[in-house]
Image (cartoon, rainbow, N blue to C red):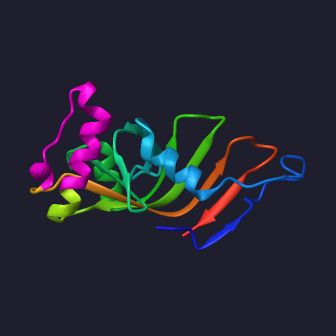
Amino acid sequence: MKPTKITRPTFPKGYVDNPISEVAWEYVEERLTRSINYWLCSVRPDGHPHVIPRWGVFADGKFYYDGSPETRHAKNIAQNPNVTLHLESGKDVVIMDGISEPAGRPSAELAQKLSHEYKSKYSGEGYSPEPDQWDGGGLYVFTPRQCLAWTTFFENPTKFVF
């Protein structure tokens, strides 16, 4: 999925008054693809935030991750699918807002792709799911609405809208 609009995020005066460049979407996509750890923020039923590190795969413009429907974040998104996903760096920043929901049983082609990518990234950590891992559920998909990214805050904050 490519952004439909590229603009600047809105900041208060004095934060980023004279940006000189933009972050390329291809750079953001590459960061999302190669990252190992992602942070997912969901909202508890009482309105409080819940943040958890996730492993996952960025493919075809979406972030796929897995887990039990009994986890706190899965229970949260069942009631409110609005989440924020961001990478670890506070300097080379990627923050995405969007919707997370159960992905259902993936097609054979997608399951193969996700299995391959998971194994490439996480087999050294002891996690190597087979393509049939998600046949009974447990796969989630995050679809972005917008993304904020920058590599130098004062120079290139960029907003992508999908």
* Residue 56 can be seen, yes or no: yes
* Residue 105 can be seen, yes or no: no
- Nearer the observer, 27 or 137: 27
Q: Is residue 158 above or below residue 50?
A: below
Q: Residue at x 89, y 52 (%)?
A: 17
Q: Is residue 45 above or below residue 146?
A: above
Asked where in the image residue 5 lies, by quadrant, the reply is: bottom right
Instruction: Describe residue 54's horizontal placement relative to residue 115 as left or right.
Output: right
For the C terminus, give its image quadrant.
bottom right
Q: Position of residue 6 (x, y in %)?
A: 67, 67
Instruction: Describe residue 62's horizontal placement relative to residue 122 as left or right.
Output: right
Q: Residue at x 28, y 55 (%)?
A: 140
Q: Position of residue 21 (x, y in %)?
A: 79, 53
Q: Position of residue 151 (x, y in %)?
A: 69, 42
Q: Is residue 19 above or below residue 161?
A: above
Asked if residue 124 is among those painted magenta in the image, a careful observer would answer yes
The residue segment tinted magenta is: 112-134
